[in-house]
Image (cartoon, grey):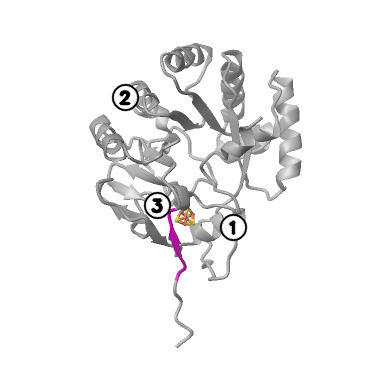
């Protein structure tokens, strides 16, 4: 019987990246290309509790976690965001995945102070999807392009070195996007290097592609991390709260193997490099 599809199995190589979904569906934007399915109502208040995060940090004490990623939907909408940030900064570097709409000069100054209280760094991954204002606003919503540029400018002013997280929605290729975004950044006084851009393939939610057993990739997020949500542990941000990515209810006992059975997995494989985690090698001098 060789016509029955069996998904390839993936095993964690190390637990270096802890993703924490602060809110599954609370976001102030509705981007066209987002992999999250949002309800029509804008007011979902599904915030994870700080106690759940404390418990997860305790349970992962023996893991070599190098970076905690605060994700959402939009993590900065969490009412306890500042306390969660401070808590995570006691452990390691913290990367915030944000659309930038809550960051202005005052907030950037405050965040620099919070970073200064810790031995670790705050890293920002700001979502922006097109170098052209009209096209970007078409994807993310009116006014969002200017908002995110203002956030970048504010962060740079206070000494942060943000990463621009770009989804190649129009399939223009990394080279074009990087060079066009470099021009945009230079106009706002940000001398962005290649490692300031994380360009990913767009995941088409209507895709039904399955993973073959003979795939190749550089790395997958599920090989180096797990995501904590209010509902338990999952393989990666793509499969947070999806039964196909379920790894357990807490970090006391969770699965380190998973099968690559969703079309999201195919996007990861086509992307070659991890979609969400930072490649620290790019930042080594
Ligand atoms: S979506 Fe990507 S990171 Fe998540 S389980 Fe599949 S291959 Fe791994």
**In the visual, does 126 lie left or right of 118?**
right
Query: Quick check: marks 3 and 2 in contact, CB under 8 Å?
Result: no
Q: Mark 3 near ligand 1 (CB under 8 Å)?
A: yes
Of residues 241 and 251, the one drawn nearer to the viewer in this rendering: 251
SS at mark 1 in the image: loop
Name the residue that disc number 3 marks.
Answer: 235
Of residues 27 and 113, the one drawn nearer to the viewer in this rendering: 113
The part of the chain drawn in magenta is 7-12
Label 3, label 2: how many angstroms apart (C-alpha)? Answer: 25 Å
Residue 59 drawn in magenta: no
Name the residue that disc number 2 marks.
Answer: 80
Instruction: Name the residue rendered at 73%, 21% in the picture.
Output: 187
Residue 153 drawn at (x, y percent): 62, 18
Residue 120 drawn at (x, y percent): 46, 23
Query: Quick check: marks 1 and 3 in contact, CB under 8 Å?
Result: no
Nearer mark to the viewer, of 1 and 2: 1
Which is more N-terminal, label 3 or label 1?
Answer: 1
Nearer mark to the viewer, of 1 and 3: 1
The image quadrant that residue 9 belongs to is bottom left
Name the residue that disc number 1 marks.
Answer: 217
SS at mark 2 in the image: loop
**In the visual, does 190 lie left or right of 211?**
right
Which is more N-terminal, label 2 or label 3?
Answer: 2
Label 1, label 3: how many angstroms apart (C-alpha)? Answer: 17 Å
In this rendering, does residue 39 appear at all? no
Nearer mark to the viewer, of 3 and 2: 3
């Amino acid at each position: 019987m060789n016509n029955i599809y069996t998904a390839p199995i993936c095993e964690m190589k190390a637990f270096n990246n802890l993703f924490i979904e602060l809110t599954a569906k609370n976001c102030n934007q509705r981007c066209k290309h987002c992999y999250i399915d949002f309800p029509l109502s804008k007011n979902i208040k599904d915030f994870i509790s700080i106690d759940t995060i404390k418990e997860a940090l305790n349970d992962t004490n023996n893991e070599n976690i190098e970076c905690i990623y605060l994700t959402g939907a939009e993590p900065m909408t969490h009412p306890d965001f500042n306390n969660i940030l401070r808590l995570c900064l006691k452990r390691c570097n913290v990367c915030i995945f944000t659309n930038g709409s809550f960051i202005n000069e005052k907030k950037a100054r405050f965040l620099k102070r919070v970073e200064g209280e810790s031995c670790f760094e705050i890293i920002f991954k700001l979502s922006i999807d097109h170098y052209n204002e009209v096209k970007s606003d078409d994807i993310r919503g009116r006014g969002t392009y200017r908002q995110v540029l203002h956030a970048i400018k504010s962060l740079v002013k206070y000494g942060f070195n943000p990463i621009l997280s770009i989804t190649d929605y129009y399939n223009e290729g990394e080279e074009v996007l990087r060079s066009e975004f470099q021009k945009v950044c230079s106009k706002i006084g940000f001398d962005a290097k290649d490692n300031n851009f994380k360009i990913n393939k767009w995941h088409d939610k209507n895709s039904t592609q399955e993973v073959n057993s003979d795939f190749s990739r550089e790395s997958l997020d599920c090989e180096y991390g797990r995501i904590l949500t209010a509902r338990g542990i999952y393989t990666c941000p793509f499969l947070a709260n999806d039964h196909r990515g379920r790894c357990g209810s807490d970090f006391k006992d969770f699965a380190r193997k998973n099968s690559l059975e969703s079309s999201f997995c195919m996007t990861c494989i086509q992307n070659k490099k991890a979609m969400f985690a930072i490649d620290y090698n790019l930042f080594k001098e």
